[in-house]
Amino acid sequence: MRLELPHSGERFGAVRINELQRVIELDSGSDDGPGSVPPDAIRAVERDMVIVVPCMNETRRVIEGVLSGIPHDCLIVLVSHSSRHPVDRYEMEVQSVRQFCRHAERAAVAVHQRDPGLAAAMKAAGMPELIDEDGLVRSGKGEAMLIGMALAAMSGRRHVGYVDADNYVPGAVNEYCKAYAAGLHLAETPYAMVRIFWHSKPKLRAGRLFFSRRGRSSEVTNHFLNRLIAEHSGFGTDVVATGNAGEHAVTLDLGTRMRLASGFAVEPFEYMDLLEQFGGVLEPSSSDVMASSVSVAQIETRNPHFHDNKGEEHVAAMRTQALNVLYHSPLCLPAVRAEIAAFLTDEGVLAPGQEPPRARIYPPVGSLALDRLFDVLTAEATTFHQVERVRPTVVALDRPILRTQVPEVGLAG
Amino acid sequence: MRLELPHSGERFGAVRINELQRVIELDSGSDDGPGSVPPDAIRAVERDMVIVVPCMNETRRVIEGVLSGIPHDCLIVLVSHSSRHPVDRYEMEVQSVRQFCRHAERAAVAVHQRDPGLAAAMKAAGMPELIDEDGLVRSGKGEAMLIGMALAAMSGRRHVGYVDADNYVPGAVNEYCKAYAAGLHLAETPYAMVRIFWHSKPKLRAGRLFFSRRGRSSEVTNHFLNRLIAEHSGFGTDVVATGNAGEHAVTLDLGTRMRLASGFAVEPFEYMDLLEQFGGVLEPSSSDVMASSVSVAQIETRNPHFHDNKGEEHVAAMRTQALNVLYHSPLCLPAVRAEIAAFLTDEGVLAPGQEPPRARIYPPVGSLALDRLFDVLTAEATTFHQVERVRPTVVALDRPILRTQVPEVGLAG
């Protein structure tokens, strides 16, 4: 893959946010010119990468397409929140994963977010905050991502990437994963994140496809994230283009140190958390990270993002939850806080004078006792499946995919 | 890339048509299991492959996307039939190609199908049949493909693949090229062809996307191609699924021996020509090929085919031109010929008792004097561009992309 080299970016303490860089070609072959990340370098990252697919009631065909786009050397982790009654959609998803893994000779892990055994495991591992009044892991995208990161940390691999399950184009999924690998390879620090900016999001308008450049929610989130940063530096900026990026990857050295937010707040809050922990304004949480640096790359894909239209309500929820976490950040200066409140009041989301609700913020995955998580998960979570790599006619001799011991990576320092 | 292994197929003389095989995963990494074609094997084919992009008035953005999806090691050949007045769209296309090649550090060749210099070159090289009453190369897809194959033969590379320029998904273009390379690698003969079967073709229906499995024209073409084959063997067959495949690749050892048909007849006629020349029913044209075998692989992609809707007229033209070449083939037995005539009459395309028109069939590219083609092309064709690979800050030392000498491959034996 060949990427445009970023010309500049913003620096906020130890955090370096690169400006958007485009994918120039999906496959740059054996070329070693500037911006070209050779296949061997990409594969080296993929071998160390877990791809988490959060999934909720997607059709089987779409899921199968998504799986087929994930590079072979990555470990697949499916975290499902699909309905189990009247039809057990999760069971169908696990069947699809098993079938794909059999044909593709690869491994995967799957779990259902609302499995009581998973809740017990997360509680035992030290994160009771994640459990709701029904004794189950809370519903929400942030919660699914947190589960995915915990499973990734147990794999002994070094990176985790997220790919939404509602993507109609396997080639786009493939491009996201290659972009993760290329971006993480190019980052010159173990604390790196790659966020995807979609080339376009085709919409149906008057019977034809219109290739829209901007998401309905992203524009607002990015605007206020940039305002928040600019208010500190005194210089206006457009650097953040991926505030709501669902498609992103992170090294586990960084990811397991990050606090994740609940629901749709999770993606913009990643920016806030990096700035809060490593931005140098508040007390830093880790001297190791501060001594190195945190790199955020933003990569514009070539493929359009054809996915399910989740409707206006979904978009409004995303936007409000994003602005809530910005508003409540200790880094958000009064002028920006007032602008956010004014915006939400204008939109009719808040009554005049009302404060935005606070999103739930979870402790870092690095604080979990992964050995206890693993033990309870395997003992009690009936929806937890480790699909091992099988060779036809050869007895599977692989060890379990996830480790029973706490791996060395993934501990907050 | 990992492909499903074909279980069976049809044999017609020296021609082996494999049944459809699905792409299981886009990138099978370093796995060496059954059906997995490792990246190095794919790259070896790509280095020897020319990708021809026939193009007609596509928008710049779409063309740029298509280019970005063609693997780096392939040589790009653009054959344009775009309008030149009032806006010179071809000039815009060449600009796009130049810009892409500069960023991606790669080479390309471009020519306009209606350039008088190209017509002069094709005439000098020995194919006056290609020239119309205006003294220009005839309009039509088959003619564009023939020009592309002639340019490919001059590149000294061993394979040529075709990718339509109206594709909205760069990842799909990438998958086609990978499938070509994987299929040609797996073919155990120098006389091999790979044809793409689209996973689906999304259409707008009632404001949502419907993922249609079959093209409106393909169903009819495939039906009659299968009937034509079955009438010889006495066994009904569904083996042909790619009669109209615009996306296909061929070794130049085979391609330069094939006669191509005009217009939209070109794709189904490829099947007919292989069966006529190498099917063992008519007099074989080459004992070399007969002693070896001809392999046709049909690969079902993972990506849907999102492209421009060319409308009903286009579909009707494709279907009629396809059936015309089947009808007139000396291999078409009377029963099938009668069925085709009845079908076209029912459709109102033919008056009762009327014969379908004959498509123009051109001699093989291997019969061309490529040295004369090259000389006249470089001397007279003002739209002919060889965009060389440039390194920033390094003087380009590459030799011309196309050769002045007739390469060893590409001669009909």
Image: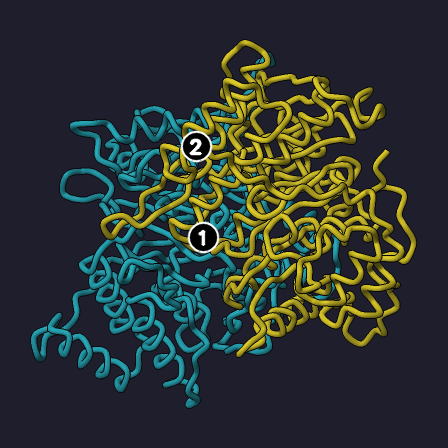
Chain colours: A yellow, B cyan
Q: Nearer the viewer, residue A217 or A313?
A: A313
- Residue at the limit of the structure toward the top, as seen here: A234
Q: Residues within 10 Å of mark 2 (few under 14, many from 20)?
A: some
* In-front residue for pair A297/B119: A297
Q: Position of residue A320 (x, y in %)?
A: 48, 40
- Would you place residue B31 above or below residue A232 in this image? below
Front of the two marks 1 and 2: 2
Q: Classify residue A253 as left or right of residue B407.
A: right
Residue under label 2: A219
Chain under numbered label 1:
A
Q: CA distance from mark 1 to mark 2?
A: 19 Å
Name the side, left or right, on which A77 lies relative to A1.
Answer: right
- The residue shown at (41%, 87%) is B236
For label 1, count other residues whose C-alpha is less than 10 Å away and answer few (under 14), some (14-19) or many (20+): some
Does A367 sit left or right of B380 as displayed? right
Residue A235's x, y, as percent?
A: 53, 10
What residue is rendered at 78% in x and 63% in y?
A120
Query: Is B324 situated above or below B124?
Result: below
Camera-side residue: B136 or B237? B237
User: Residue type at mark 1?
Assistant: His
Q: Nearer the viewer, residue B210 or A218?
A: A218
Kindly give the residue lying farthest to the front in the view shown.
A353
Q: Which mark identifies residue A307? A: 1
Chain designation of label 2: A
